[in-house]
Image (spheres, rainbow, N blue to C red):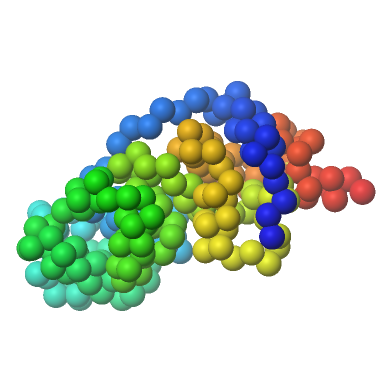
Amino acid sequence: MVKVSHNEIREVDNLLVQVYGDKRWQKHAEPIDELVLTVLSQHTNDVNRDRAFKKLKHRFHSWEQVLSAPIRSIASAIKPAGLSNQKAPRIKAALKKISEFNGGKLSLDFLAEMPLEEAMNWLKNLPGVGPKTAGCVLLFSFGKPVFPVDTHIFRISKRLGWIDEKVTEAQANDLLDKLVPNEIKYRLHLNMIAHGRKICKPQKPLCENCVLKHLCRYFQQKLS
Ligand code: SF4
C-alpha cells in the first residue's frame, strides 16, 4: 500500500523547501475556528470557505450564539461554502458536544494536554469530523505533529507513487502520518499544498517545471 522510504520523503521535502521556502509553525486560528473552517472547506475551495466563515462570524458574535441558533440560520450564513444543509447541523452538533464535554464552556484548549492519539480520536468522534479535519485542528492550532492529507497531498502522493491507487483519502491520512518525520510534517503539508496549486495541478500538471519529476512515477510513466 505504501511505497516510499523516509529518505525519499526527506528528499521531496528538501526540494520543495528550495521552491516554496522553509516554514516554522505559527498558530493559524483558535481551535474551534480551525475546526469550523475545516468543516466548511469540505468539497469547496478556499475562497468559498473563507466567504462562508466570514459571514458566519459576522452574523453570530460568538460560538455560544451559533450553538443556540436555529440550524436554518447557520445554514443560511454558510451558504457560500455549499452543502450548507449538511454542514450547519454538523457544526451545531460539534459545538454541542464540545460544550457538554467541557461543562458548558466552548473551548478545545483541553486538547493541548491530551496525548496525541487520544486527541485525534476525541476530535474524530465529533459529527462530520474525519482524520483530515482532526489533523488540521491539532497541527494548525496546537502545533502537534500530525500530517493531514488534503486533496492536493492525496493527488501528489499518488502521482509520486507513495501510495497505491486504491488507497482512500482516510487511509492515506493514517499511512502518511506514520511515514512523514514529525519535524517536517507542518512544512511538508504546506509546501505540498502550494505545489499542488501551482505545479501538480489536478488537470494537466506542469511536469516540465516540476522539481520532483525525477522521483515521480506519473512522470516516468508519461515518458515510457
Ligand atoms: S512530475 Fe508532474 S505529476 Fe509528478 S509531482 Fe511533478 S507535477 Fe506532479
Q: Is residue 61 visible?
A: yes
What is the residue that sits farthest to the front in this orientation? 115
- The residue depicted at 19 percent of the width and 48 percent of the height is 109
Query: Residue 215 appears at what percent x and percent y?
Result: 76, 39
40 w.r.t. 83: above or below = above
Horizontal side, residue 104 vs residue 85: left or right:
left
Q: Work out which quarter of the rendered image holds the N terminus and state it.
A: bottom right
Query: Residue 160 appears at what percent x and percent y?
Result: 71, 47
Query: Residue 195 appears at what percent x and percent y?
Result: 59, 39
141 w.r.t. 21: above or below = below
Residue 65, image quadrant: bottom left
* Front residue (pair 60, 37): 37
- The residue depicted at 68 percent of the width and 67 percent of the height is 166
- The residue depicted at 16 percent of the width and 64 percent of the height is 101
75 w.r.t. 36: above or below = below
Query: Residue 120 appears at what percent x and percent y?
Result: 36, 57
Q: Is residue 76 visible?
A: no
